[in-house]
Every structure is written in C-alpha cells, then in structure tokens.
C-alpha cells in the first residue's frame, strides 16, 4: 500500500462539517434538518455587492497584485480609519479568506515546534492551521461558569517558554461569543510586551457586538505596533462567506515583507470578490445596524429558550453569532449523531456542532455543543422545541 503523510493522519476533522454525511442521509429519508452547526448567515449580502457581481466591468477575470487590488485595500483602509484605527494600505495583505491570513501568520512568525497560546474553546480550524504549519497549540481553558472570559493572566505566564511565539485570541469569540474588555486586552498587552511575543487577534466578528458594548481592537494600542497582527474577513461582516475574502493586517514592516512571500507564492486573491467587497464598503448604508439588530433579537430568543430546558446551560454571548451550550448528556458528539441518525420530530431534526472539536484535545469537555443563531427566529424557535424533545427522549 502506498504510504501517506503523518501530517495527513494528524489533521483533525472539522466538528462543523464532519457530520454532514449524517445530515445528507437524514435529508435523503425526507427529514428536514435545521442547520445550527455552521456560521452561514441567512441575512442577505449587501445589495451593492450583489449588483457588483452582476455588473463586473472586466473582459478578463485576471490575477490581481499579490497583496490585493489597490481599490479594495483602500476601501479596507478607509473602513478601519472610520473606526478610529490608522491602518494604511501598506499594512494590509488581502487573503483568500481569514483562514489564509492565519496560515500566512503562522508561517511568518513560527518555526516547526514553536508554540502559540490560545484560550479554549477556540475556533476549531486553529487546530488544523497549527497542524499544517507544524506549530504546537498550548491551550488555556476558559470556563462556562465565567461565560468563557479571559483566564487568569497568571495561567498564561505559566505556559510561556522559549518556544512561545504568540498569544492568539478570537475577539469577539467563535465559538463562545465572548467579547474581551478593555481591561482584559490591557493585561494581554502588558504580557506580550513583557515577553516579546506577538498578539494575534482574530476580529472577523468585530461589527457584531451587543448590549451596548464596544469592540476595542488590539490596533488601539500604539505600544503594540510591532507585536499585533489582526485577522480580518468579509465573510461575516457582509454575509459573504463564499467570497473567501480576508486580510492580514499589521504595522510591523518586516513581518509584512515576509508575509508577502507567502502571498506571492499563492499568486493572488480573487479579483471578483475584492471588487464586490469594495463596492459594499463604499455603499454600506445601515447594513451593520440592521444586521446587528436582527442578530440581537435572535440571540435573545435562543438564549432565553435554551435556558428553559432542564439541565441546559447557555451563557449570553456579547458578540458574534454563536452560543457554546452545555447539554445534560455524557457525550455531545454521540448525541449530535443520534439527532441526525435516529431522531426526528414530525419529520424534522437539528444539526449542531459537537463542542469537543473546539478544544485542543477532544476529551477536554464532552458535553458542550456550538449553536449558531444564523437562522430566522421562527426556525430558531422550532429548533429549540426539537432539541427539548430530543433531550428528553435521548436521556430516557
């Protein structure tokens, strides 16, 4: 038998997508599946972006500059300046999704075997990016009892070694929806300066912050000019997940020069996506306010209804559009498979993302799921009803 790589065997499966075959099988039997497993909003993309795709002014869909088109980079720079952060076009490398921005970042700052500290639970694909980059994730567990807030800074200090290169946060968080406060960011700032580390902040949900809270970017700290790398994406900001358009942002000139080598090696980001996103930025109108209001109403419904189910614990997220939920089951992955394989309520069931995939080790926590409130409120209400009945039946 031909041999395959060790890395291929070590690559983790996505907790968000690995149960898709079970969902496909359920649908083939005529069961309607409510998808709470994936962060694919049903909110429409901006009209200006959709019109741009229909009115492309190109005769050839060509390569762009490896760092992105001047027009899109200016639009993104203006967006950040509008939020009060002095990001210039030369601080931006456009990427094929935020995923590529993270891969570039890991490739530039870390050697094989180096370590990146991440509070967990964290975005599941961080595990995959670390595997691809031969980087070791060093987790620090946050807890549902503390709404997944920043763990004590002393626990970070204890994990720092001569192999530590960076601390990575998701702000606001996927899968928890947690929003770091100014005071928490200040503690991280002091820590990375003390130990001369990078601070990577995945801020793709920055527009979706609730309850009167304010998103404070790590770009707001001038002392971190050399240390900060922000990961950006249009996927969630404009509900343009399929455009696969992100960015790596840093004021560290040498770091960005080296990242450009990675950008050149993959040639360029997608022309059409950059054109459409630039048009969305130019004609944003009330898009963020309207989308934010819709997410708030969905969050409030979902959190209230979930917490009515006996044994369910669902903190109230301050941002993004996810809840990390504790269920009264021994193994949430087995329960998620059972929902698709063996259960239906009047011809309907729900699909959730098992929470163990959002930890560095799958046995860390086994009774949590991530639920995305990306469906309309009627579907969310129905999904909670199905989940309530399913838990009763499963535990019986």
Image (cartoon, grey):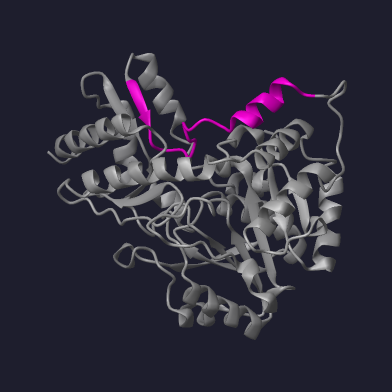
Residue furthest left as drawn: 396
Residue furthest front as drawn: 285
- Please state which of residues 221 and 161 is positioned toward the viewer in this rendering: 221
Q: Quadrant of residue 221?
A: bottom right
Residue at screen point 45% across, 30% down: 20
Query: Quadrant location of the N terminus?
Result: top right
Taking the image as shown, residue 347 lies to the left or right of residue 156, namely: left
Q: Quadrant of residue 226?
A: bottom right
- Please state which of residues 25 and 99 is positioned toward the viewer in this rendering: 99
**Residue 134 in sight:** no
Residue at screen point 46% across, 40% down: 290
Residue at screen point 52% across, 44% down: 288
User: Residue 362's spot in the image, x, y percent?
Assistant: 43, 53
Q: Is residue 336 above or below residue 173?
A: above
The magenta-colored residue range is 32-56
Taking the image as shown, residue 140 lies to the left or right of residue 74, namely: left
Q: Is residue 36 magenta?
A: yes
User: Residue 231's spot in the image, x, y percent?
Assistant: 65, 55
């Amino acid at each position: 038998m031909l041999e395959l790589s060790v890395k291929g065997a070590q690559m983790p499966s996505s907790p968000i997508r690995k149960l898709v075959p079970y969902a496909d099988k359920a649908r083939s039997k005529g069961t309607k599946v409510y998808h709470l497993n994936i962060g694919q909003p049903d909110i429409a993309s901006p009209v200006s972006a959709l019109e741009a795709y229909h009115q492309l002014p190109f005769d050839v869909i060509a390569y762009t500059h490896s760092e992105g088109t001047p027009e899109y980079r200016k639009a993104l720079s203006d967006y950040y300046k509008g939020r009060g952060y002095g990001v210039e076009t030369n601080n931006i490398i456009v990427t094929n999704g935020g995923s590529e921005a993270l891969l570039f970042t890991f490739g530039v700052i870390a050697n094989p075997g180096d370590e990146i500290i991440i509070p967990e639970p964290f975005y599941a694909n961080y595990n995959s990016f670390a595997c691809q980059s031969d980087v070791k994730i060093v987790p620090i567990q946050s807890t549902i009892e503390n709404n997944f807030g920043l763990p004590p800074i002393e626990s970070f200090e204890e994990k720092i070694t001569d192999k530590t290169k960076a601390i990575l946060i998701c702000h606001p968080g996927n899968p928890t929806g947690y929003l770091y406060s100014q005071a928490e960011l200040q503690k991280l700032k002091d820590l990375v300066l003390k130990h001369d580390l990078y601070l990577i902040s995945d801020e793709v949900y920055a527009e979706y912050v609730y309850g009167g809270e304010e998103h404070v970017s790590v770009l707001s700290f001038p002392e971190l000019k050399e240390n900060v790398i922000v990961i950006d994406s249009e996927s969630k900001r404009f509900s343009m997940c399929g455009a696969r358009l992100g960015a790596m942002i840093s004021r560290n000139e040498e770091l960005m020069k080296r990242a450009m080598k990675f950008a050149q090696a993959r040639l360029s980001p997608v022309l059409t996506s950059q054109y459409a996103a630039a048009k969305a930025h130019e004609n944003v109108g009330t898009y963020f306010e309207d989308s934010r209001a819709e997410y708030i109403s969905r969050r409030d419904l979902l959190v209230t209804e979930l917490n009515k189910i006996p044994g369910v614990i669902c903190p109230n997220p301050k941002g993004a559009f996810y809840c990390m939920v504790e269920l009264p089951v021994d193994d949430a992955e087995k329960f998620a498979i059972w929902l698709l394989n063996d259960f239906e309520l009047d011809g309907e069931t729900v699909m959730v993302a098992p929470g163990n995939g959002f930890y560095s080790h799958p046995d860390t926590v086994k009774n949590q799921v991530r639920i995305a409130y990306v469906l309309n409120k009627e579907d969310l209400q129905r999904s909670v009803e199905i989940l309530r009945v399913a838990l009763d039946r499963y535990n019986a």
